[in-house]
Image (tube, grey):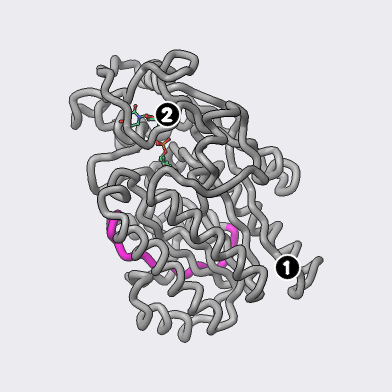
Amino acid sequence: MNKTILITGWLGYIWSHAVVAFSQAWYEVVIVDNLSNSYLEDYEDICSLLWKQPPFYQIDLRDMWKLEDLFKKYEFDWVIHFAWLKIVWESQDKPLLYFDNNVSGSINLFKCMDKYNVKNIIFSSSANIYTASNFEWWRKAVSEDWAIGNTTNPYGTTKFLIEIILWDLAKFNGFKVMSLRYFNPIGAHPSGKLWENPIWIPTNILPYIMKVATGELPEIKVFWNDYDTVDGTGVRDYIDVNDLVNGHLKAYEKFRTNLMELGFSTWFFYTYNLWTWKWVSVLQLITTCEKVMGINLPYVIAPRRPWDLAEVYCDPSKAERELWWKAKIPLQESIESSARVVMFGE
Ligand code: UD1
């Protein structure tokens, strides 16, 4: 019998890709989303891609009654948890909203999982949980065993809190946890039907660049050019969303194999960095976008965002070794796939 997977936050950018990938791999997927940052219309696109309609429930994880009804209705084997508020400045403006939505919502989810004995979870974590000074002092790709905590903003704190809660649930409550840490997903689905399409003005760089490319926004604001980096602008490791989702599939397969091999009594908590090893500055990103799209992209230098770090990149070699996964899609291709959708609607 197929395994039934609950995916939370499915209409968000990454998880709409994940729903498609997991469904195409013949898993039964049930999805919940509160539609706070996504469009219901995307559901039709996803159904048309899949030729079926994965059951969808509009539920906010803070609504314990509705959530519990869902756990009564389905026998889930796994949960993949992505329902999350993720705008850094907003999290500084409204930390309690973030703690309520991200932390209380997750705890409700864990309570239901515990009550209905669904203890397997893949958690979408973040490089935000690594202690920021790791990146500042060492200028090395950070690996999974480096210190976590001392986050720079409440959004990162919510990811950190949930990881340590899951750690204890694995240790003391039989949860089986796989936590995947990543940072800057970009790109679109090859079908051209799924891409990052936030309801509000984008805060992440590539969707912002795309809005400048289409003329919806006048110019790119480069948040400072005086960092100690290759050209003074922030350096990141941008990963294609399709590579990222493939990493989740690999993690899921590894998860199932390990559970079968190690048995259900073993303490089970794994973390993996999903990164590409390719480091790109903001100006390099803009230049690459210009080349790929064949247009000029106006930009101005604007003040630093207070939470930004000069360089953020992690070491994915553990995932490459243990999950047999590797990010393959070049930056140009990710930009091209986003540009095709945004500029030509393909
Ligand atoms: C942010 C989040 C990260 C999340 C990622 C993807 C933090 C500190 N960052 O990463 O957790 O995984 O988004 O959702 O929590 N930039 C500009 N102009 C812009 C926007 C960005 O110059 O209009 C620069 C930034 O200063 C940075 C780079 O572009 O150097 C990437 O920024 P962004 O896309 O916002 O991602 P991060 O802040 O790296």
The amino acid on which the numbered mark 2 sits, given as a three-letter code, is Glu
Is 296 above or below relative to 238? above
Residue count near mark 1 (Cα–Cα under 10 Å), binned few <14, some 14–19, many ≥20: some
Pick whichever, 231 or 340, lies toward us. 231
- Asked if ligand 1 lies within 8 A of label 2, the reply is no
Q: Position of residue 55 (x, y in %)?
A: 42, 71
Task: Decide if residue 246 is on the left or right side of residue 191.
Answer: right
Task: Decide if residue 190 is on the left or right side of residue 177.
Answer: left
Is 77 above or below relative to 20? below
Q: Position of residue 218 (x, y in %)?
A: 18, 25
- Residue receiving disc 2: 336
Q: Quadrant of residue 1?
A: bottom right
Highlighted magenta segment, given as a residue range: 25-39
The main secondary structure of the magenta stretch is: loop
Tell me the SS state at disc 1: loop
Q: Residue at x 58, y 51 (%)?
A: 180
Q: Position of residue 148 (x, y in %)?
A: 57, 48
Q: Which mark is residue 267?
A: 1
Specify which label sits upstream in the sequence, 1 or 2: 1
